[in-house]
Image (tube, rainbow, N blue to C red):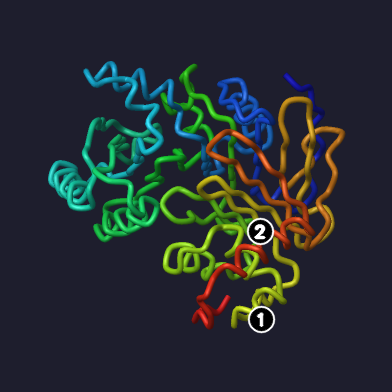
Amino acid sequence: MEQHTYRSPNEEEQRGAFLLAAVEKRNIPTNEHVRTVLEALAQWGNLEQDSATIQLDIPRKLWMEKLANAGQNPEIATNDHFTVGHVHIPRSADAGPIRTHLRQLCKQFGFVLLFESIRPSADENTLFWQIAMLPSDVFSLPDRLFRLMTTMERDSNVRVASLSHIHAVYKADTLAHLLREPDVSHPFLASAAAFAYVGQAGAPLCYKRLGSAGMLVHRAETSVSGIETLIYTYSYSLLEAAGLAFMPDAAKQNGLPPLKQTHALFAAGSEQEAIWIAGTAETLWKTDASSRVFIASKPYGDTAEPLAPGQPLALIRSVAGQIQWLDGTRFRQEVNARLSNRRIADIPIAF
């Protein structure tokens, strides 16, 4: 495991928010990778005050065990369309009818429920309903999951942490509660990438769920409401949506105004793509370690280097397991190439 020296936080970091992304270079999911990220969260964050959210690849080995214990074929967890949902319901609510309604919605949207469990979350305030299912067909799967999630949340008692065939998101009111979640401490919890946010209310960095299982972290003054609309209403990829938001030329060519903020910190992970944009010097740091790459809002280790302000750094992970990093120039070339193949113009989005 890499050895790192943690630097003292500056005044802004002490206000209680940071993000940390870690990508295993070989794209091989391991529990050791997850443990490294969790140890950094525990050392940087306030265990009793900071809320915590972590996005991981669906832990296939852990789900093989869950399915086997439930009498299901464990190999189902290796299916590329195997879908996992994490839903939170207040303990004060009548969970029985709510779950019945949610099961009906899953069936209505074309999913076959294979597994479900419900237990108190570590904070004891909510019930954690965990489900696994397969789609009856794979047509427009990300869009269907997004629409299913938004329909679920029409019930004010339902909050979906994630609903995805790629990622699983764990959320908790405090970092201590997150670390006590049974799945999070399970030795089979493995991932090749992790995207985590820890913060307090009113902190300069804000967290927003992106779609049904994505994560978006940004400065409080940054408007990012159009990103999700571009992805889920107009079927743009994360990189395309971010390119339109932050690249004035690309936005102008597609009839959109770019983001007005000039000091925006922006980081997002959705599906198999991620992007980081530093608003000013030393707002995002990259550490290229021996087996993984870290990108964080504070220096991770002695070799951390700040990302150039305004220059996007993006990641694409292929289904075959290949990792492609795109710096500012290559990112712009990729976004322009994708946008040139589109015929949609004059999209009514105002960032």
SS of the residue at dot 2?
Answer: strand
Residue 181 position, x and y percent, is 43, 28
From the viewer's perspective, tell me whether residue 243 is left or right of residue 210: right
Marker disc for residue 266: 2
From the viewer's perspective, tell me whether residue 133 is left or right of residue 96: right
Mark 2 vs mark 1: give the one in front. 1
Q: Nearer the viewer, residue 53 or 135?
A: 135
For marks 2 and 1 on the same chain, the one whose residue lies earlier in the sequence: 1
According to the picture, the residue beneath numbered tag 1 turns out to be 252
Q: Residue at x 65, y 65 (%)?
A: 243
From the viewer's perspective, tell me whether residue 242 is left or right of residue 208: right
Residue 186 position, x and y percent, is 46, 20
The three-letter code of the residue at mark 1 reads Lys
Q: Residue at x 48, y 33 (%)?
A: 178
Residue 314 position, x and y percent, is 68, 51
SS of the residue at dot 1?
Answer: helix
Q: Residue at x 33, y 52 (%)?
A: 139
Q: Residue at x 51, y 79 (%)?
A: 347
Marker disc for residue 144: none
Residue 115 position, x and y percent, is 25, 30
From the viewer's perspective, tell me whether residue 340 is left or right of residue 188: right
Label 1 near label 2: C-beta < 8 Å? no
Indicate whether 339 appears above or below 36. Answer: below
Please identify the quadrant where the N terminus is shown. top right
Classify 10 Å Cα crowding around label 1: few (below 14), some (14-19), many (20 and above): few
The three-letter code of the residue at mark 2 reads Phe
